[in-house]
Structures are given as C-alpha cells and as structure tokens.
Amino acid sequence: MKERLKEALRETAAEFLAREANRQSLITVTETYLSDDSKRAQIFITVFPDSAEQAALDFCQRSRGEFADFFSKRVKAHVPHVEFVIDKGEKIRQRLDELSS
C-alpha cells in the first residue's frame, strides 16, 4: 500500500506540475519519500535551467494546497503533508556523467 501511495504521489505531482508550472522552466519529479506513518511526504524535483531552481521550488511550495486538492480528486486517498525538495543527488549524478564523458 505504501509503495502504491508513493507512486501515486510521484505520478500526480508530475502531472500537476506539467499543468500548473509556468513554461519558463522544466520541473521533473525524480523521487518521492513517504514517512512510515504515511502522514508526511517529500517530493524530490529537478529544474532546468538551474537558474530557475529557486523560483520553481517557491512555486511548488506555494502550490501545496492546490496539489493536495488535485491529488485527492485523482487518487481518492489520504493526502499526506507534502514538501517539495530539490533533488541534490540527481544533480550530483548528472555532474558526474558530464565529467566522465
């Protein structure tokens, strides 16, 4: 059940951000984390270009309420408290790929 909720969060967040975010940047959902009690979730994102990262993160944080409504209508499940986070691990992996090329 927890894995299904994590996947639903990831898919729904990706759909929500594709619809609602401005077209100045590309926001990609890379991972979701769900607490053991399923009451808190972190949605990890990457942003292109890097210069738009803070603005995109601010947008995501401001839109948490709208996302919760969107999620509850789509998934019909309890909506955990959501926090959006920049995926630093993905940025490091991308940089390592660039250096090894």
Image (cartoon, helix red, strand yellow):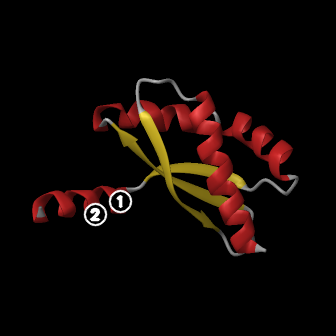
Q: Is residue 51 left or right of residue 62?
A: left
Q: Closer to the camera, 91 or 54?
A: 91
The residue wearing badge 1 is: 90
Question: How many other residues sit within 10 Å of disc 2, few (<14), some (14-19) or many (≥20)?
Answer: few
Spot occupied by residue 12 in the image (x, y as percentages of width and height): 68, 48
Q: Decide: few, some or many residues near mark 1? Use Cα within 10 Å; few <14, some 14-19, many ≥20.
A: some
**Residue 61 location, x and y as percent?**
57, 38
Which of 58 and 9 lies nearest the eye of the viewer?
9
Q: Which image quarter is the C terminus in? A: bottom left
Residue under circle 2? 93
- Residue 26: x, y in percent? 43, 36
Q: Secondary structure at mark 2?
A: helix
Residue drawn at point x = 82 percent, y = 52 percent: 75
Residue at the outermost front position? 101
Q: Amino acid at mark 2?
A: Arg
Residue at x 64% of width, y 53% of height: 11
Q: Is residue 97 left or right of residue 31?
A: left
Mark seen at residue 19? none
The type of residue carrying mark 1 is Glu
Quarter of the image with the N terminus in it: bottom right
Residue 33, compared with residue 51, is above or below; it is below
In this rendering, position of residue 20 left or right of residue 71: left
Q: Label 1 to label 2, Cα distance in Å? A: 5 Å
Q: Position of residue 92 (x, y in %)?
A: 26, 61
Residue at the limit of the structure toward the right, as seen here: 76
- Residue beneath the point at 41% across and 24% down: 24
Res 51 quadrant in image: top left
Where disc 1 sits, the SS reads helix
Q: Is residue 73 above or below residue 91?
A: above
> What residue is at 20 percent from the left and 57 percent from the top?
95
Question: Is there a contact, CB below 8 Å, between mark 1 and mark 2?
Answer: yes
